[in-house]
Image (cartoon, rainbow, N blue to C red):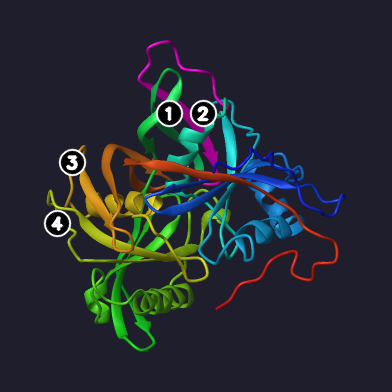
Amino acid sequence: MESALVVPRLPPHDPGTPALAVVDMHTGGEPLRVVLAGCPELVGPTLLAKRRYMRQHLDHVRRRLMFEPRGHRDMYGAVLVPSELPDAHLGVLFLHNEGYSSMCGHAVLALGRFALDFGLVPAPPAGAREARVNLHCPCGLVAAFVECEGGRSRGPVRFHSVPAFALATDVLVDVPGHGKVVVDIAYGGAFYAFVSAEKLGLDVCSSKTRDLVDAASAVTEAVKVQFKINHPESEDLAFLYGTILTDGRDTYTEEPTTNICVFADEQVDRSPTGSGVTARIALQYHKGLLELNQTRAFKSSATGSVFTGKAVREAKCGDFKAVIVEVSGQAHYTGTASFTVEDDDPLRDGFLLK
């Protein structure tokens, strides 16, 4: 027997706290919770100023959306805001379990679809097979190209990164429990340390996720203490976001190379990591292992999902030789929700288990 149609309505809640309306998506298994409505206005003349404002005054919104009981420790989110850049269609702040990141490739791939489908960008001309969405991320302007049909998204999305570069190669760090380990550090909108899992006595394809997380987190903490991260254009971007453990297959091959990214507070990316792919392409190009427009496939050891990436042209970032990287992947919608709070709920702002 079919159930009667039920029109959703909000449960009892604090009338002084607006409900947070969201659309949930995923890209290669990595979640993205996009805020549709309910987030208070973010104050500031620039995107980075709005990011600082949210961190200082509205961090409870992030915690409510990312943490249990509405989310989980590996949830990821996006808040859309106006941008001060004339070429940007919209700005975006990225949310995770620890705070706010400077770039998120899987989110850009999803937001390309979202922006087109929800009318946040001009409709493409009749018959167009691709629509461009200019997203102002904290790291800079990123262009997403969305396959479309009849003005709606379909198929994969690709984006062109900000200038990506190798910050340092063959950096020797002392990692507790693992001894001296050689890592590379590269930037793809965020800074990552890269190391073959084999150097840590692990296999990125078969080791337990917990063991990979522990090892990657130890590398991240060691690099933070022993190596100074600098960005040539903004101190807001000068921090190590996480560590990416690889299968060590940096030399070009048509077969996918596998990695796992552990970022923020031991958060595990289910996708191949869009900004990580960007940084890894820049690193391989810097080492002469990859040519312009030579496409590589990157596989997530967590889900088996695949992104592709290639360096499309050379660029500069301060004094660093850099490349613009194109990353492609597929995002999907998973649902919608409205999140409320009750004023007597002691866990209204969420919690995390470790």
Q: Position of residue 188 (x, y in %)?
A: 39, 50
Q: Is residue 104 rendered to the left or right of residue 289?
A: right
Q: Which residue is mark 1?
A: 153
Queried whether the magenta region covers residue 132, the answer comes back as yes
Residue type at tag 1? Ser
Q: Position of residue 176 (x, y in %)?
A: 39, 87
Q: Nearer the viewer, mark 1 or mark 4?
A: 1
- The Cα atoms of the two marked residues, 3 and 2, are separated by 31 Å
Figure quadrant of the N terminus: top right
Q: Which residue is mark 2?
A: 117
Residue type at tag 3? Gln
Regarding residue 162, the answer to whether it shows in the image is: no
Q: Which residues are magenta?
A: 120-139
Regarding residue 199, the answer to whether it shows in the image is: yes
* Contact flag, marks 4 and 2 (Cβ < 8 Å): no
Residue type at tag 2? Asp
Q: Earlier in the sequence, mark 2 or mark 1?
A: 2
Queried whether the magenta region covers residue 204, the answer comes back as no
Helix, strand or loop at label 3? It is loop
Disc 1 crowd, CA 10 A, few/some/many (<14, 14-19, 20+): many
Q: Residue furthest top?
A: 126
- The Cα atoms of the two marked residues, 1 and 4, are separated by 34 Å
- The Cα atoms of the two marked residues, 4 and 3, are separated by 12 Å
Q: Which residue is mark 4?
A: 251
Q: Position of residue 303 (x, y in %)?
A: 32, 59
